[in-house]
């Protein structure tokens, strides 16, 4: 087994354990392997070990890797901040976008989604920590944004996504995940059929599953530490 296959296996086991601990059915939480900064060969290794959903943060990397890996049946998740002048390549390539934080971006993605592809599956990113530097809409705006996104013809609103504060304080993390979970209930009570809570990364996956995550986004625990150019 390659190192990536071994690490992927360990993440899957941790996920099964977290599901069991939370009293949730095995397999109820999906795993998005976050491959940002890693080369196509790393994704091939994970794919060979059965992984199908991959997450990318940067538009250029999505463009490059979808081209380099066009022979594989990958489900591409775009999870990074999205500027309005960069929506087209994402609309043309991704299966999912987790990081919608304003209506304008959603409208552009819907307008640019090619007719021959199924609707783009989208989550609204919510700033649950209140940090000024964080992307995401504020919790008070989520319902209005969801009502604007839901009718867009080429998008399917699936749920909510968050990145909590970078802290090891488990109670704080849990309370921020719980905010996302409660907001999803608010949307459902308003008649919006959302089924996805995208939350939990390498360090806090178990907590996120306990708070109701249905998709975790795990990078370094699968692929190792990231090295950014120039650092
Ligand atoms: C990088 C990233 C992840 C994965 O983080 P790890 O700590 O490496 O698991 C998940 N979600 C988003 C939005 C990211 O940018």
Image (tube, rainbow, N blue to C red):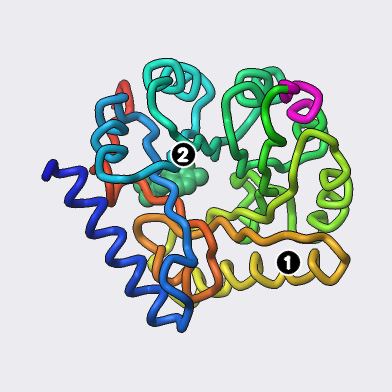
Of the pair 120 and 203, the residue shown nearer to us: 120
In the structure shown, which secondary structural element does the residue marked by tag 1 occupy? Answer: helix
- For the point 26% across and 38% down, the residue is 48
Looking at mark 2, is its residue's CB closer than 8 Å to ligand 1? yes
Residue 183, numbered circle: 1
Question: In whole angstroms, how far apart are the C-alphas of marks 2 and 1?
Answer: 23 Å
Where residue 8 appears, as percent x and y from the top left, is 26, 51
Residue 168, numbered circle: none
Where residue 223 appears, as percent x and y from the top left, is 26, 42
Mark 2 surroundings within 10 Å by alpha-carbon count, few (fewer than 14), some (14 through 19), many (20 or more)? many
Is-magenta flag for residue 95? no
Give the side of residue 95 with respect to residue 37, left or right. Answer: right
Q: Quadrant of residue 21?
A: bottom left
- For the point 40% across and 64% down, the residue is 204
Mark 1 surroundings within 10 Å by alpha-carbon count, few (fewer than 14), some (14 through 19), many (20 or more)? some
Image quadrant holding the N terminus, namely top left
Where residue 173 appears, as percent x and y from the top left, is 50, 69
Q: Residue at label 2?
A: 55
The residues colored magenta run: 108-115
Compared with 216, 76 (above or below) is above
Q: Quadrant of residue 230?
A: top left
Q: Earlier in the sequence, mark 2 or mark 1?
A: 2
Where residue 19 appears, as percent x and y from the top left, is 41, 74
- For the point 32% across and 22% down, the residue is 229
């Amino acid at each position: 087994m390659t190192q990536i296959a071994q690490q992927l296996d360990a993440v899957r086991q941790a996920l099964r354990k977290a599901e069991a601990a939370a009293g949730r059915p095995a397999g109820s939480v999906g795993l998005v392997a976050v491959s940002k900064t890693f080369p196509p060969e790393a994704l091939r290794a994970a794919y060979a070990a059965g992984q199908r959903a991959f997450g990318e943060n940067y538009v250029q990397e999505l463009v490059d890797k979808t081209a380099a890996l066009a022979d594989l049946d990958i489900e591409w998740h775009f999870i990074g901040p999205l500027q309005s002048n960069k929506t087209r390549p994402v609309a043309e390539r991704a299966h999912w976008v987790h990081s919608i934080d304003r209506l304008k971006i959603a409208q552009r993605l819907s307008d640019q989604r090619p007719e021959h592809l199924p609707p783009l599956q989208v989550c609204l990113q919510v700033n649950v920590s209140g940090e000024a530097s964080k992307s995401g809409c504020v919790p008070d705006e989520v319902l209005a944004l969801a009502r604007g996104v839901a009718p867009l013809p080429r998008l399917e609103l699936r749920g909510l996504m968050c990145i909590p504060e970078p802290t090891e304080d488990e109670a704080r993390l849990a309370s921020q995940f719980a905010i996302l979970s409660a907001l999803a209930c608010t949307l459902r009570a308003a008649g919006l059929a959302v089924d996805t809570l995208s939350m939990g990364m390498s360090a806090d996956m178990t907590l996120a599953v306990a708070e109701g995550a249905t998709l975790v986004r795990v990078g370094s625990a699968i692929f190792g530490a990231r090295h950014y150019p120039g650092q």
